[in-house]
Amino acid sequence: MTQISTQPYKGTRDFYPDDMRVRQWCYERMRQVCERFGYQEYDGPLLEPFELYAAKTGEEIVNQQLYSLIDRGERKLALRPEMTPTMARMVAAKFHELPKPIRWFSNPNCWRYERPQRGRLREFWQLNVDLLGGDPILADAEILSVAVGIVRAFGGQGKVAVLVNNRRLMDHFFSQELGLSAEAAVKVTKALDARAKIGEETFLKWVQEAGASQESVDRIDRFFKASFEETLKAMPCEGATELAALFKVLREAGFSEDEVRYDPTVLRGLDYYTGTVFELYDISPENRRAMFGGGRYDNLLGIFGNYKLSGVGFGMGDVTLRHFLEAHGLMPKFGEWVDVYITLPTRALFPIADRIARELRQADLKVISAIEEGGFGVQLKQASKFGARFAVILGEVELSRGAVMLKDLAKGEQREVLMDDLAGAIKPLV
Ligand code: HAM
């Protein structure tokens, strides 16, 4: 018989308990920030109809990265590569009932058939935060505050930069300034997006194939080098005006240029963005991939019917977050995962050990009760191995006085404590 590999499927991870603690800890932090801003948690299915993504998710994900399948009833489905279409579907389904603005967050696992590399896997968890309705500029600013708030909650202030652009500004530049058709603009955008990866020669080839002249290439270069003030002056279009209004609100809220700034290279691959787009980057050079990406989508709900509600949101992956926390030494040391280990010198004492365990659990302590009898030495070793802070030792002499020995495993000290006082003795110390 051939043996089955113990390795997880390429690009996925096993979360052993130590990894799970990290994942839960991260999620708790993110959840706290979202809730402080008044966002509510939602969830949806991992499988969705294929068309949900074919409509607006973007060519690269749909054609190259989607895990699709046919179910037993011949329906074409996909594993979600992102959460935004599910969120939009859920909002559209209860459009008239949901109080607006809608502030929602979720932490789904998503699947993309990518070539696994640093920061990119095939299964990842992605915090999604979305705000639908309200004044678009104030909503964009709020979403950016949540994004920065999350980084700050991990102690990461000063270690990231949010780069902001606007799709309308880019559309204006491509169509009005360069005279490119929508189709050519998409090709040029793709070339720009991949410029660093493909190198200058291939980049020029791609742009010229898309129909851009050498003069246009020079103008593209000038545009990408210009400061926001220069662009606003040279191209006072709707997108630039929106960006100026957004920066005004952000500066008033105290965000510095180092923290949030204009960057025309932020283009975003997803098709549904229409206005503000942004990405958040770790400033440390070893983590080159975006930690968050998001933007405003004006017409996404329109794929479900006549629903008009503009939204803005972002997704933040767990892989890049972990790299960020490690690179900056922001990951805490996780200590004991149980508070008390109750030893069992003989099986006959199990009812007493079990009663103590129940009482301590009632006092909200995390308790392991030994399920095999054994000598103290062996059991104390076990207690340390399981990461307990305290061991309760059941000795005949102490039990005859209604007491037990309480050993502080971190300090190596022990003392006699009445059984009735045990919870009170341990609680203040954990
Ligand atoms: P996205 O830029 O495709 O946007 O992904 C956002 C973030 O998810 C990335 O910056 C990265 O942290 C993480 N991510 C994406 N792909 C992978 C991967 N293969 N492995 C690990 N992490 C990954 C979206 O998905 C939009 N739906 C976000 C959004 C929400 N826009 C509005 N609301």
Image (cartoon, grey):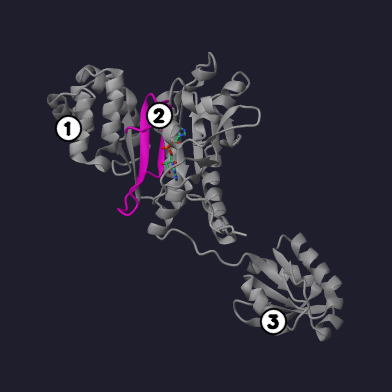
Image coordinates of residue 90 in percent, x first then y, are 59, 27
Which residue sits at x=80%, y=73%?
A: 419
Q: Main secondary structure of the magenta part?
A: loop
Which quarter of the rendering shows the C terminus? bottom right
User: Does residue 188 show up magenta in the picture?
Assistant: no
Image coordinates of residue 63 in percent, x first then y, are 43, 31
Q: CA distance from mark 3 to mark 2?
A: 60 Å
Q: Which residue is mark 3?
A: 378
Q: Which residue is mark 2?
A: 59
Looking at the picture, which amino acid does disc 3 mark?
Answer: Val
Which residue sits at x=26%, y=28%?
A: 188
Image coordinates of residue 296 in percent, x first then y, are 42, 27
Mark 3 vs mark 2: which is more N-terminal? 2
Q: CA distance from mark 2 to mark 1?
A: 26 Å
Mark 1 vs mark 3: which is more N-terminal? 1
Which residue sits at x=50%, y=19%?
A: 303
Crowding near pointer 1: few (<14 within 10 Å), some, many (20+)? few
Q: Which residue is mark 1?
A: 221
Mark 2 vs mark 1: which is more N-terminal? 2
Q: Is residue 212 above or below residue 369?
A: above
Q: Left or right: where does residue 223 sit relative to residue 313? A: left
